[in-house]
Image: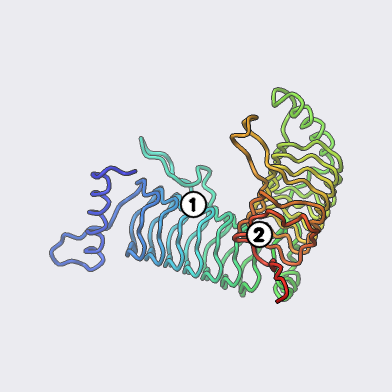
């Protein structure tokens, strides 16, 4: 919690900023400079911060509903998990910012700069955003957002909800849209050279338009290590057997492994995030505590696989076979005091086969369960709060 003096300094800066915005004739107004400040969790709903300097500031979990941030300097800032619903960010500088997991429904980012940008450390000051200069909006909610005329080259929108967003006239060269929801999005005159859209959710009209422009929405630009996977798996199994004291853990990102055969392999703790794994065979595989988040797993086969404690957040599992798969919690402490659940948060399970599997104890927050195939045990004891697309059984009157 911030101490009183720190809060007073922030309040004073905000008051003077309002005077500065009004061009106070008394000359007491001053543009707010809260660069590198820790403003995490602060309530700033509907405050006018237009033009404010917030370089490298931490605004994680901040409440910024309807806040005016047009032409604000948010270079290298951390806005992860902040609530920016309806915020006005026209012309804002968000280069190098981390905005992962933030809510930006109906936000206006017209003309904003979301390109790469690295803030060099200066003495005791260190930017709260991404240290490698990337700009990330991973897992964000940007439904109905205005993103027209933005500079978004190489920006990472993996797993984000961009349904109904307007991206007209924006530059998305090299941007990453793996697993993103683009249904109903407008992309007129949008530059898409080198964009990665593996597993993205598209309506038929947008898919056809993108394919007419030569964009392979199922894997353009992904690297492939298929020829080396048997060697990587062998090293990973040594890593598992020796409890991390030998071998090498599988740690892959943005790799094309469509249709690869992982059947019956020991893959506990493996990391394959943002990967193209459509149609891959994981039947009988042991994937306890593995991380497959935001990967394209459409039509993948997980029949009888052990996915206990597995992270499948934001993954696209439409049509996947999860028949008899195991989703048990993992006992991290060994004494039953700390359990790690399997997570399907914000994943898409449209039409997936979950017969003879149990979702009890599984994280289903924001999960799309439309048309899933179930048996009697599948939803017994499951917490479906926040899940989408499922229809509860109603006994006849």
Dividing the image into 4 quarters, which one contains the C terminus? bottom right
Please name whichever residue, 51 or 346, is drawn nearer the observer in this view of the structure. 346
Which residue is most to the left?
26
Image location (x, y in percent) of residue 203:
71, 72
Q: Which disc is residue 281 wearing?
A: none
Compared across the picture, whether 192 is left or right of 349 comes to: left
Which residue is most to the front?
397
Image location (x, y in percent) of residue 341:
65, 44
Badge 2 marks a residue whose secondary structure is loop
Compared across the picture, whether 57 is left or right of 257 comes to: left
Q: Residue at x 57, y 70 (%)?
A: 165
Image location (x, y in percent) of residue 261:
86, 45
Q: Which residue is label 1 attached to?
A: 80
Q: Nearer the viewer, mark 1 or mark 2?
A: 2
Quote the CA–CA distance across marks 1 and 2.
20 Å
Q: Residue at x 43, y 41 (%)?
A: 120
């Amino acid at each position: 919690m911030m101490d009183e003096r720190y809060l007073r300094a922030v309040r004073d800066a905000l008051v003077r900023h309002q005077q500065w915005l009004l061009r106070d004739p008394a000359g007491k107004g001053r543009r707010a400079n809260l660069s590198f400040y820790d403003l995490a969790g602060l309530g700033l709903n509907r405050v006018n911060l237009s033009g404010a300097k917030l370089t490298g500031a931490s605004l994680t979990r901040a409440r910024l509903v309807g806040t005016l941030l047009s032409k604000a300097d948010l270079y290298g800032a951390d806005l992860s998990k902040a609530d920016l619903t309806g915020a006005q960010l026209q012309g804002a500088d968000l280069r190098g910012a981390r905005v992962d997991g933030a809510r930006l429904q109906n936000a206006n980012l017209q003309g904003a700069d979301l390109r790469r940008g690295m803030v060099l450390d200066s003495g005791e000051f260190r930017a709260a955003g991404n240290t490698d200069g990337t700009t990330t909006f991973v897992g964000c909610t940007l439904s109905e957002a205005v993103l027209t005329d933005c500079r978004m080259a190489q920006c990472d929108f993996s797993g984000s909800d961009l349904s109904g967003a307007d991206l007209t006239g924006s530059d998305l060269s090299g941007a990453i849209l793996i697993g993103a929801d683009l249904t109903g999005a407008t992309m007129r005159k949008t530059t898409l050279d080198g964009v990665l859209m593996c597993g993205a959710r598209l309506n038929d009209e947008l898919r056809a338009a993108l394919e007419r422009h030569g964009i392979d929405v199922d894997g353009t630009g992904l690297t492939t290590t298929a020829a080396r996977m048997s060697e990587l798996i062998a090293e990973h199994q040594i890593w598992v057997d020796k409890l991390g004291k030998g071998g090498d853990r599988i740690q892959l990102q943005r790799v094309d492994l469509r249709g690869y055969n992982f059947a019956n392999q020991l893959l506990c703790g493996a990391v394959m995030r943002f990967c193209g794994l459509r149609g891959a065979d994981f039947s009988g595989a042991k994937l306890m505590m593995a991380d497959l988040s935001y990967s394209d797993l459409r039509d993948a086969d997980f029949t009888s696989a052990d996915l206990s404690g597995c992270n499948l957040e934001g993954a696209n599992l439409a049509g996947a076979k999860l028949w008899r798969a195991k989703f048990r919690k993992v006992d991290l402490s060994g004494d039953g005091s700390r359990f790690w659940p399997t997570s399907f948060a914000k994943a898409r399970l449209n039409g997936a086969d979950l017969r003879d599997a149990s979702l009890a104890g599984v994280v289903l927050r924001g999960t799309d369960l439309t048309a899933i195939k179930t048996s009697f045990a599948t939803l017994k004891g499951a917490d479906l709060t926040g899940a989408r697309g499922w229809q509860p059984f109603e006994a006849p009157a």
